[in-house]
Amino acid sequence: MTKQTELPWVAEARKYLNLKELPGKQHNPTIINWLVELKAWWRDDETPWCGTFVGHCIRAAGRQVPSAWYRAKAWADAGTTLTSPAYGCLAVFDRAGGGHVGFVVGKDKFGNLMVLGGNQGDAVNIKPFSRTRVIAYVWPSQADGTRSWPALERYDLPLLQSDGKISTNEA
């Protein structure tokens, strides 16, 4: 991949790598702050929060957040639909019981997408995901709703280290 400047929403997401839910009745204050910032009506880290994480990062980067940001699959309509993954795009996935959303940050040698997301095993991390689960690749819209597109170089995904074990826990 050609050396490029980091995307603001990916830079924001990377700040939270390794952040985790708190077990039991306690809740991670960072996740609670995101819920307050996004005007959620709940205050816990037990409710699936991948859309909350993406919403925070997109909002912090000055991009448009959809009204149903808390629904992972709502992100499928949050910008320009792409036919293939580009570095920094949203990948919206199907899963039993709902969906999942995160940022594409690479690929592994097994052909999986490497996705930076929240609520992946109850944490923010980068995990391999099967491309067969993807229902949409989306480039986030500008704050005013204007559509934008990735630079062509962003389609050349960097190769990241992975054990090839795809994510199965995003709820």
Image: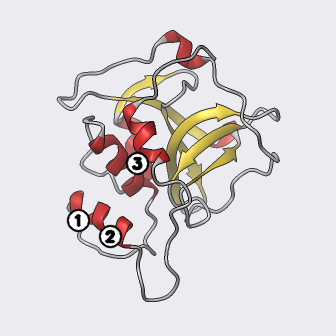
Q: Quadrant of residue 34?
A: bottom left
Type of residue at label 2? Ile
Q: Which residue is mark 2?
A: 32
Q: Secondary structure at mark 2?
A: helix
Circle 3 Cα neighbour tier, 10 Å, few/some/many (<14 / 14–19 / ≥20): many
Question: In 3D space, how far apart are the residues under numbered discs 1 and 2 (Cα atoms)?
Answer: 6 Å
* Residue lying at 21% horizontally and 32% vertically, measured from the top left: 143
- Disc nearer the start of the sequence (1/3): 1
Where the N terminus falls, by quadrant? top right
Q: Secondary structure at mark 3?
A: helix
Q: Say whether residue 71 is visible.
A: no
Q: Which mark is residue 128?
A: none
Q: Is residue 169 above or below residue 7?
A: below
Q: Which mark is residue 36?
A: 1
Whether tag 3 and tag 2 are in contact, CB under 8 A, the answer is no
Residue 99: x and y in percent read: 51, 53
- Disc nearer the start of the sequence (3/2): 2
Q: Is residue 86 above or below residue 32?
A: above
Q: Which residue is mark 3?
A: 54
Left or right: 150 as drawn, with respect to 123: left
Whether tag 1 and tag 2 are in contact, CB under 8 A, the answer is yes
Residue 48: x and y in percent read: 46, 65
Q: Is residue 127 above or below residue 109?
A: below
Q: Quadrant of residue 160?
A: top right
